[in-house]
Image: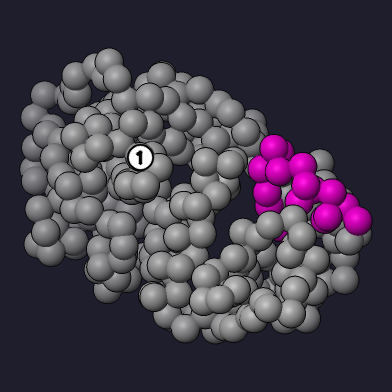
Amino acid sequence: MSDITMRPYEGAEDLRRMQELAQAVWGRGGRCHVGELAWDRFQHGGRESEWPTMLWEREGRTIAWAWVRLPGGLQFVAPDDLADEVLDWFHEVTAGDRLATTILDTETGLAGVLTRRGYRRAQDASFLLRMSRGLEGLPEVETPPGFTVRSLRGDEDVPGRVAAHRSAFHPSRVTEESYRRVMRAWPYRRELDCVVEAPDGRLVSYCLAWLDPDNRVGQFEPVGTSREFQRLGLARAACLYAMHRLRAEGAEEAMVYARGDDAHPVPAKLYGSLGFSAGARTVTYTRSR
């Protein structure tokens, strides 16, 4: 592997390279959607020092990457024959007593590498279901009287959009500034940032959809409803509206990661009611230092 070089992440252009690799392996059971990478990288500000990130390249093309969440979490995309090198780097840059990484249960090659390196599947860990559905035969969007569902109009909607997110995911580090960074990131499209407006004009529910134009797959990330407006079917309306928008933009499939364990059953039930079915699930592997 002498022709492979590694270098640290340097900014948004490198995130784009990470997304391109995620796109390239998606059709072979890839785990990371381009949308979640943009959301995760930009939803919070001031965290780069907590996130050592490395790219492996061959002839200028990214062939693997690793993103660490200190003190001991790892997200990575790499071929099985490069996973050992990724793990070596991960072990060098972390100091936590417990190391952890999450893959899909279908990634049997990576599971074998992790097991050989001393990682064991965490039996009590929370997990996500990868749920998906095609975009044919969508029902019409329905909202309670007085509520409307629409796409984000622009910067004037950012304060209300952020307030809804912070209410749904309290406490949250998302700010108006960080959300504007999300909006500047590829592949954000304002038409796919779907919100529900209450009769008093407040934005109270939302579904942010991200389109991978190469694979024609849209992902929901995140979805939420302000606490005082929950259980009114607003998230369902936002998600259904987002599916109509995704189809209009050329998507053939929508997918979402939803909690599959008993601690948080509501999201999976919501997506199931919208016609999503569960496929692969995440599994977390851990080891002690």
Indicate the position of residue 187 as horizontal and vertical percent values: 31, 57
* In the rendered image, the vertical position of residue 48 relative to residue 182, given as above or below: below
Q: Which of 273 and 32 is in front in this view?
A: 32
Q: Nearer the viewer, residue 24 or 261?
A: 24
Residue at figure coordinates x 43%, y 36% from the top left: 255
Indicate the position of residue 160 as horizontal and vertical percent values: 19, 56
- Report the amino acid beneath label 1: Arg
* In the rendered image, the vertical position of residue 230 relative to residue 39, given as above or below: above
* Left/right of residue 140 with respect to residue 19 in the rendered view: left
Image quarter where the N terminus lies is: bottom right
Q: Which of 269 and 100 is in front in this view?
A: 100
The magenta stretch spans residue 210: no
Indicate the position of residue 28 as horizontal and vertical percent values: 58, 42
Q: Is residue 260 visible?
A: no
Q: Is residue 113 visible?
A: yes
Residue at figure coordinates x 50%, y 22% from the top left: 277
The boundaries of the magenta stretch are 100-116
Image quarter where the C terminus lies is: bottom right
Q: How many labels does the image show?
A: 1
- Mark 1 secondary-structure assignment: loop
* Left/right of residue 9 with respect to residue 206 in the rendered view: right
Q: Nearer the viewer, residue 146 or 269?
A: 269
Q: In terms of image quadrants, where is residue 273?
A: top left
Residue at figure coordinates x 33%, y 53% from the top left: 165
Indicate the position of residue 205 as horizontal and vertical percent values: 26, 42
Residue with the mark numbered 1: 216
* In the rendered image, the vertical position of residue 276 relative to residue 153, given as above or below: above
* In the rendered image, the vertical position of residue 132 relative to residue 52, given as above or below: above
| Mark 1 closeness class: few <14, some 14–19, many ≥20 residues within 10 Å | some
Residue at figure coordinates x 64%, y 81% from the top left: 5
Q: Which colour scheme is used?
A: one colour
